[in-house]
Image (tube, rainbow, N blue to C red):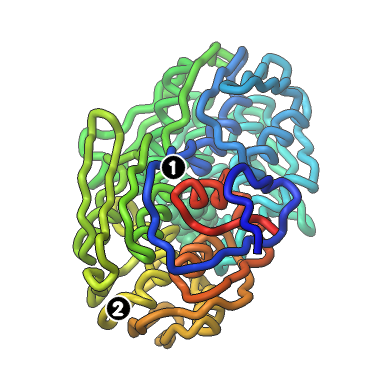
Amino acid sequence: MGWVMFENNPDNASVIRMKGGIPLYGSVQIQGSKNIALPIIAASILVNGKCTLSGCPDITDVDSMFRLIESAGAIVCKNENQIYVNAENINEYCMPSRYASVMRSSVILLGALLGRIGEASIDYPGGCVIGKRPIDLHIFALEKLGAEIDIVGNKIRAKAKKLTANTIHFPFSSVGATQNTILAAVYANGITKIENAAREPEVTALCDYLNKAGARVVLSDNFLNDGIIEIYGVEKNSLHDVEYSIPADRIVAGTYLFAVLATSGRVELQNAPIDNMNSVLHTVIEMGAQINKDINNSRIVIEVPDRNMISNLDFVETGIYPGFPTDMQSQLMAVACTSKGRLCIRENIFSNRFKIVDELKRMGAQISIKNDNEAVIDGVASLEGRNVIAKELRGGAALVSAGLAAEGITTVTDIEYIKRGYEDIVNDFARLGAQISYD
Ligand code: UD1
């Protein structure tokens, strides 16, 4: 078999093929964060000027968000390193289904469009099928700010002659609903207070961006504990030109750490968002990897000289930030399959996030599900290469990691899911010595 080791083209590929069992060595650059880029691109709708973004990941979801803001009237230009958005003329409130319906985060355009032009019409959001993903908290908060919202068939219609500040207490933490509320409140009249806001770095980055553009979004001194955000409404259309560099993707960085845990080797992550990765780094170290952090240079070196050093923890549960991220749960499960001992994972955020289990079992993993949200994994000596199917974004990436560790050839199909979040997972692993290619 001829392996195309470098710069194999992801654009038209639908399958990833790999030969497992090869340790990973080398250095990899971590891409910009998808979940930070998406709300920031949406937020650009509020900016009555030009936004210069660097570090935007080149992935399909980001592309869809750019298409959506273009439909609203923004002009988007790209060069090699930066993306320029001119949002001086936002005039269209109807978002095309083609892009909105496939992506969960399209829903935050509601807050941005309401804030800028007082009206929005958008499809009920799509995205990965990882369980019930209602938008009741988004609607509750926007209505509290004065919007009238109707859901007719698959369309959400929102209108607000004017938005007025209010206090919004979320019964539980939602990243998207928090972001939507902030966007709608930027030009609302008065001081909006959000209680029990999501504390994820994807929320703080959005606040940072908006403040750079002239908004007044203030996190409480004790934000990680109380989740209080105050948004002081500023004059309509006063947000101005802004430059912003999208921080690195903590989930991509975590995915690569777990791949080294699964295969062994020594890998340096460059441009890693170390400050936001505590729970993942803690897990990786507890499982037996050696980690060196160079905080000043955003570098993490992970070393696993021998796979036999890696043991399962007894129990890991997903949680809101700074807990263990639900977006890393599948990657942890994949490595647990061939680590010593038994791991119990409890998924606390989404209701159907074990889609990867059947695929891992086909590779020889021993996993059983209890009470719908708990998976018990008993480590086996090795997995066997199989044809497996990506059913969602992070589970798809975890299957690649499982394939890199398995004996023989693994093919992962339906990789469109993976391309939604990873710029080029194949060439990243190929540069680390893996035998992997797009098919
Ligand atoms: C974001 C991330 C996703 C991550 C998730 C949790 C993006 C584009 N996606 O998704 O990768 O897994 O945060 O960290 O940033 N919920 C409701 N009603 C609502 C909104 C949410 O019941 O109106 C529930 C959800 O079903 C889920 C929980 O709240 O059970 C948390 O979801 P949320 O934080 O909103 O996730 P997203 O913003 O969709």
Q: In the image, is residue 406 above or below residue 57?
A: below
Q: In the image shown, does 172 or 247 lie closer to the viewer? A: 247
Split into 4 quadrants, where in the image is the C terminus? bottom right
Q: Residues within 10 Å of mark 2 (few under 14, many from 20)?
A: many
Q: What element carries label 1?
A: loop
Q: Residue 35 carries which label?
A: none
Can residue 330 be seen here? The reply is no
Q: What residue type is labelled 2?
A: Leu
**In the picture shown, does residue 416 fall above or below 49?**
below
Q: Residue 343 carries which label?
A: 2
- Left or right, 148 with respect to 216, comes to right
Residue found 58% across the figure and 71% down from its top: 410
Q: Name the residue under label 1.
A: 249
Q: In this view, does 114 lie above or below 419?
A: above
Residue depicted at x 26% and y 59%: 304
Tell me which residue sits at (23%, 34%) in the image: 295
Q: In this view, does 308 lie above or below 264?
A: below
Q: Nearer the viewer, residue 136 or 267?
A: 267
**In terms of sequence position, does the residue under pointer 2 or pointer 1 come before the other?**
1
Q: What element carries label 2?
A: strand
The amino acid on which the numbered mark 1 sits, given as a three-letter code, is Asp
* Cα distance between the residues tagged 2 and 1: 26 Å
Q: Is residue 4 left or right of residue 151?
A: left
Q: Is mark 1 within 8 Å of ligand 1?
A: no
Location of residue 93 in the rendering, given as x and y in whole percent from the top left corner: 75, 33
Observer-nearest of 217 and 263 = 263
Residue 75, how many percent across, how many down?
73, 20
Classify 10 Å Cα crowding around label 1: few (below 14), some (14-19), many (20 and above).
many
Quadrant of the frame with the N terminus: bottom right
Q: Could you tell whether 438 is left or right of 206 in the image?
A: right
Res 5 visible: yes
